[in-house]
Amino acid sequence: MNRREFVRLAGSGLPAAALAESVVAAQVAQSKAPAGSRPRALMKVGTQHGDSEEILKACAAFGVNNICSRLPSDKLDETWSVDGLSRLRDRVKGHGISLDMVPLPMSSSEISTAEMSAIYLGKSPERDRNIDDICQMIRNCARAGIMQVKYNFTLIGIPRSGTAAGRGGSRYSEFIYANAKQEPPLTIAGKVDADTYWERITYFLERVVPVAAEYKVRMGCHPQDPGVPRGSGWRGVDAVLGSPDGLKKFVSIKESPYHGLNFCQGTISEQLEKPGEQIFDVIRYFGSRKKIFSVHFRNIDGGFLNFRETFIDNGSVDMLKAMRVYKEVGYDGMMMPDHVPRVEGIASDQGFAFAFGYIKALIAAVAAEG
């Protein structure tokens, strides 16, 4: 779809979700599907917005029937008990929505504000206590019927260099490595080389994955956002989960059907020189091995060390083609919007509504291809 046609539709008064579906319909008409028989489309639109009553009502209205909740608590307390998690599950279910996943208190925060910093810093015995708590959270999730969790293993957080002008006066979050300020030069972790980082990851996985396997809870780790130069890293940290090769090593450390990825397509696109060409084979690699447990389905313009987080329909990646690849590999989990651009005077939730409609339309499009 060209810009003039988008502007015409945008000015027609369509709601955000309907506008997104119209955009997709036009793009599907211009994008001929490859010939041959196809597997059934199993993906579903989802979200990680949270679980407030307002959000649940909106999700129910939009037909977003699968979600990841907000973080129950940053420590093992009553909200992480079987009763607490069961109440959360039932409250979500009351809106006709399935609570497919909860986040562990291992978020994308920079190490100085991380919930369980000892795990990343390799500081025992505190990290052992933190890991024991993570294991108990996993057990309680299983007992409450929540069979998937997500987490991060980052020390540097999510660096960005600023914002850039986007479509229609919107603002896109941007990362240009040459312009980004590494201040202070080191995190509180000091210098962390690749071997040290892998040791800390392995220590964690060796203790947690067996528990996840015993209780049949899938653990999806988010890649490092963004990718940074190998070796020199960012603020003294060699961020080993910042490349597809690093992620391949990660999933092989403790082989299990319950150890995989919260596959952020946008983040992995940021790790590639030419995401518009390369991302599809990355999806195939992890998807064919059943290591994609959930998907952050977002687009970028640019690539490694120089990118902007765009609207889902106008980045470097053909999102219809990407959705076809998820279908091809038999992925059956949530496709969640993530990091939507900012539009002045409009709440960010409206940007997510546009993304929900777009994702629903893409799923319908690839399902219709047979």
Image (cartoon, helix red, strand yellow):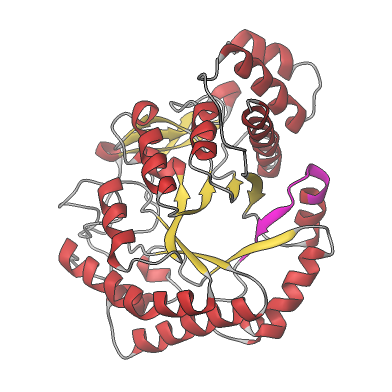
Q: Quadrant of the C terminus?
A: top right
Q: Quadrant of residue 54?
A: bottom right
**Which residue is at a point 78% across and 45% down the rendered structure image?**
63
Residue 66 colored magenta?
A: yes
Give the residue at the far front of this rendering.
37
Q: Position of residue 7 (x, y in %)?
A: 67, 14
Image height of 244 relative to 309, above or below? below
Q: Could you tell me residue 291's position as x and y percent?
A: 43, 55
Q: Where are the magenta residues, as a range?
A: 60-70
Q: Is residue 75 visible in this depiction of the protein?
A: no
Q: Residue at horizontal 54%, vertical 34%?
A: 323
106 with respect to 178 (left or right): right
Relative to residue 13, is residue 120 depicted above or below? below
Q: 357 and 177: which one is in front?
A: 357
The residue depicted at 67 percent of the width and 73 percent of the height is 145
Q: Residue at x 79, y 64 (%)?
A: 93
The front one of 25 and 15 is 25
Judge left or right: residue 66 versus residue 317: right
